Image: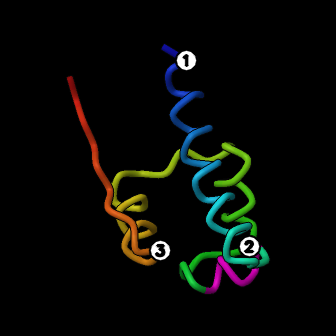
Amino acid sequence: ERFELDDLLYNISMKIFDYRMENKLSQTELAKKLGITQVMVSKLESGQYNPSVEQLWKISKKLGWKLNISID
């Protein structure tokens, strides 16, 4: 179970990191775009933070992504 959660957090962190790199943004610039702190961006990118569904939804909207959640 822990491995599955770690894998999910890793995927989220890489998606956010890749977006920042592709758009040539600093963590501070991305934080401003998302309305969060640079420290929070760092935690999200490192997988040290487990965001709520609401937080993921807000991040997705601000980055122009569609959030899909599947429970099988």
Q: Is residue 30 above or below residue 71?
A: below
* Residue 66, percent from left and from top: 32, 62
- Dot 3 crowding, Cα within 10 Å, few <14, some 14–19, many 20+: some
Q: Secondary structure at mark 1?
A: helix
Which contiguous range is marked in magenta? 27-32
Q: Earlier in the sequence, mark 3 or mark 2?
A: 2
Numbered badge on residue 63: 3
| Circle 2 crowding by C-alpha within 10 Å: few under 14, some 14–19, many from 20 | some
Residue at 47% across, 74% down:
63
Farthest residue, direction top: 1
Q: What residue is shown at x 60% (from left), y 59% (from top)?
A: 16
Q: Amino acid at mark 3?
A: Leu
* Residue position for label 2: 38
The figure's colour scheme reads rainbow
Whether label 3 touches label 2, CB < 8 Å: no
Q: Which residue is mark 1?
A: 2
